[in-house]
Image (cartoon, rainbow, N blue to C red):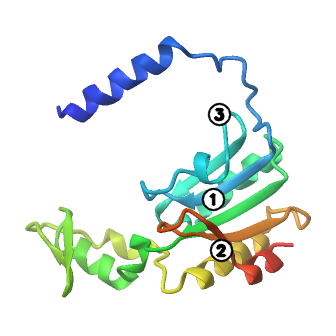
């Protein structure tokens, strides 16, 4: 066990002592959802001005519109009343540092952690690896604006997404903290 477990449990104990959110309703109060990256530098509550109970925040690697992300958005709309969605990717994303083929090769070599240097990604561990990674679409990113546009289009084209729900496309700049609209994505999300 590491100190992280103790730190998390101590923080939770302090949070629970003054907990006053028990009466928040399940549906988000501001009726919108954000699909964004899991990157630890992003704090959607701060960059979008959220308080607990305001919005659904769906996070994954790259903030991509995977089948599971779309599943969550559909539930957010159908059962919990969101009426607008945001796709927010960000600058300096780790998903820009590799391709599907690189990920598959790394996993085939070893399941241990990899590292990156000026020459690219390298496996740090010894096998065994697995070819199971070849069955996953890793949704890596070559161009942020293009990936936001692709994700908005993928969401809007999904047969379970109602045509009248707006989907907005943005890129969060990790250097300035600003959201920058991707106009083509927002236009596609109308």
| Earlier-in-chain disc, 3 versus 1 | 1
Q: Disc 3 designates what residue?
A: 52
Within-10-Å neighbours for mark 3: few <14, some 14–19, many 20+:
few
Calculate the distance from the C-alpha at mark 3 to the C-alpha at mark 1.
16 Å
Left or right placement of residue 171 versus residue 120 in this view: right
Of marks 3 and 1, the one in the foreground:
3
Left or right placement of residue 19 versus residue 61 in this view: right
With respect to residue 139, does 73 lie above or below? above
| Earlier-in-chain disc, 2 versus 3 | 3
Residue 17 location (% of width, % of height): 48, 12
The quadrant holding residue 145 is: bottom right
Q: Does the rendering let one see residue 161?
A: yes
Within-10-Å neighbours for mark 2: few <14, some 14–19, many 20+:
many
Task: Spot the residue most to the right.
Answer: 164
Q: Does the rendering let one see residue 65?
A: no
Name the residue located 33 percent from the left edge and 21 percent from the top edge: 10
Q: Disc 1 designates what residue?
A: 35
Secondary structure category for the residue under label 1: strand
Q: Quadrant of the N terminus?
A: top left
Of marks 2 and 3, the one in the foreground:
3
Q: Disc 2 designates what residue?
A: 151
With respect to residue 157, does 142 lie above or below? below
Secondary structure category for the residue under label 2: helix
Left or right placement of residue 176 versus residue 163 in this view: left
Name the residue located 87 percent from the left edge and 72 percent from the top edge: 190
Asked if the residue at tag 2 contacts the one at tag 1, i.e. Cβ–Cβ closer than 8 Å, the answer is yes
């Amino acid at each position: 066990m590491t100190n992280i477990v103790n730190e998390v449990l101590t923080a939770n104990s302090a949070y629970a002592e003054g907990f006053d959110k028990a009466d928040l309703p399940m549906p988000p109060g501001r009726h919108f959802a954000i699909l964004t990256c899991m990157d630890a530098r992003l704090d959607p509550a701060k960059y979008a001005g959220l308080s607990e109970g305001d919005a659904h925040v769906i996070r994954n690697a790259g903030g991509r519109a995977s089948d599971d992300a779309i599943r969550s958005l559909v539930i957010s709309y159908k059962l919990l009343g969101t009426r607008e969605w945001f796709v927010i990717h960000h600058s300096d994303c780790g998903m820009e540092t590799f391709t599907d083929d690189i990920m598959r090769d790394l996993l085939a070599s070893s399941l241990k952690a990899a590292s990156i240097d000026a020459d690219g990604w390298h496996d740090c561990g010894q096998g065994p690896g697995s070819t199971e990674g070849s069955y996953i679409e890793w949704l890596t990113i070559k161009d942020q604006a293009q990936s936001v546009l692709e994700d908005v289009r993928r969401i809007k084209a999904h047969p379970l997404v109602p045509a009248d729900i707006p989907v907005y496309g943005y890129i969060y700049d990790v250097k300035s903290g600003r959201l920058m609209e991707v106009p083509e994505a927002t236009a596609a999300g109308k």
